Amino acid sequence: MSQQPHQDEPTIGRLIGDAQKDISKLIQSEIQLAKTELKISVKAGTAGIGLFAAAGFLLLLAIIIFSIALAQLIHWNGDGLDLHWAYLIVFGVYTVLAVLLVLVGVSKVKKVKAPERAIAQAQETKAAFAKH
């Protein structure tokens, strides 16, 4: 006596098919959620970058105005150094500051090293795969 599956009971094939459809829908939903979150993050990031650029531009203008004010202060309405010397002093101060920043930057860059442990681990993994 063979028993026929009841109409209400799903077959194994149908259960597997339903599970595959559900997993596919779940993955698509997760991908859609990630896309939506990324869009929001990109918009916020773009706005932030724009604000940083505007702040940088305003800071550049402030440095220019400060430089002029400093030169005028050194000139002190004609009682100090001549105006051309005052501007040259401000230029010299900025040049020395830039050279110092470059020297510090070069020393920091020289400290950058390759990720030696990660490279060694990758070589071990490669060797392990090569054996098999």
Image (cartoon, rainbow, N blue to C red):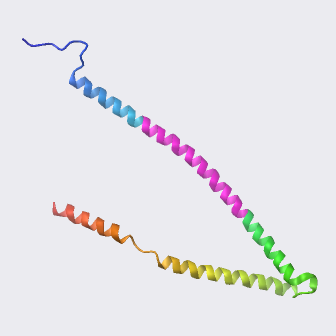
Task: State the residue at coordinates (93%, 81%).
Answer: 77
- Left or right: residue 21 compared with residue 81: left
User: Residue 67: image x %, image y %?
Assistant: 79, 76
User: Residue 93: image x %, image y %?
Assistant: 73, 83
Task: State the residue at coordinates (65%, 80%).
Answer: 98
| Magenta part, dominant SS | helix
Q: Does 123 sit above or below residue 77?
A: above
User: Residue 114: image x %, image y %?
Assistant: 40, 72
Task: State the residue at coordinates (93%, 86%).
Answer: 79
Magenta residue check for 52: yes
Q: Does 14 sit above or below residue 113?
A: above
Q: Does 126 sit above or below residue 95?
A: above
User: Residue 66: image x %, image y %?
Assistant: 79, 73
The C terminus, quarter of image? bottom left
- First to last magenta residue range: 29-57
| Quadrant in the picture for residue 61 | bottom right
Task: State the residue at coordinates (68%, 84%).
Answer: 96
- Left or right: residue 78 compared with residue 24: right
Farthest residue to the left: give it.
1
Magenta residue check for 43: yes
The N terminus, quarter of image? top left
